[in-house]
Image (cartoon, rainbow, N blue to C red):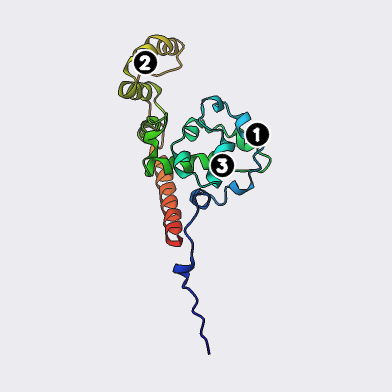
Amino acid sequence: MTITAFPTEAVARAPRTFMQEVIEDTPGGNPRLEMCIQCGTCGGSCPSGPDMDYSPRRIFAMIEAGMREEVLRANTFWYCVSCYLCMVRCPQEVRITDIMYTLKRKAIREGYYRDSSASDAPDFSETFVDAVMKYGRSFELGLATRYHLRHHPLDAIKLAAGMGLNMLRRGRMDLTPRRINNLDQLHAIMDKAKEISQAERAQIGGGA
């Protein structure tokens, strides 16, 4: 009598493909990436499309092809302005903007953002988040000053002498930051969001 040995679940489970990673690591459930029909509506709708290395449509094809390094080194997701126009117009209801955020997180965690033409974008994002956490809103003058002095000091002077002065004259920019009321409530919301995100990552990691 021959006894057939079946592999255990740990042995039988194949490594996740890059596409599976992106899908499973996007919070909020299935982002419907596998439903993309390569119609190009997303790229045609994107206000930042001309500045991107690859259009969202092409990025999705590269994800499916397993081109991990090429995708995470691209500047595509850094130029996403989160206007959600692509999602509104997508005939397949692919959660394009959510996927862009997933790619940003992966590029930072794995260090690929350093090779991107938008390598200073994570620092800009962190500066913005710091201001929001401290004041409850963006402080444009502080954000622009800190970012440009660190990365583009000559541009900081041009910005201040041009657009900065015009915005101040029109009352469109504050010289000092202003905190929102009930800032502790915002902190509670952010803490809960981090807790949910960590739980989702732990669940994915435990099932990988």
Q: Is residue 129 visible?
A: no
Closer mark to the observer between disc 1 and disc 2: 1
Q: Amino acid at mark 1?
A: Thr
Q: Position of residue 200 (x, y in %)?
A: 46, 54
Q: Nearer the viewer, residue 194 or 94?
A: 94
In the visual, does 18 lie left or right of 147?
right
Between 88 and 77, the one nearer to me in the picture: 77
> Judging from the image, what secondary structure is the residue with disc 2 in?
helix
Task: Report helix, strand or loop for mark 3.
Answer: helix
Mark 1 and mark 3: Cα distance apart in space: 13 Å
Residue at image coords 66%, 35%? 89
Q: Give the spatial CA distance, label 1 vs label 2.
A: 34 Å
Q: In terms of sequence position, does the residue under pointer 1 or pointer 2 come before the other? A: 1
Q: CA distance from mark 3 to mark 2?
A: 34 Å
Quick one: label 1, few (<14), some, or many (20+) residues within 10 Å?
some
Mark 1 or mark 3: which comes first in sequence?
A: 1
State the count of labels: 3
Q: Which mark is residue 21?
A: none
Nearer to me, 206 or 5:
5
| Mark 1 vs 2: CB contact within 8 A | no
Q: Name the image quarter holding residue 114.
A: top left
Closer to the camera: disc 3 or disc 2?
A: 3
Disc ID at residue 60: 3
- Residue where numbered disc 2 is placed: 155
1 vs 36: above or below = below
The residue singled out by tag 1 in the image is 41
Amino acid type of the residue that numbered disc 2 sits on in the rendered structure: Asp
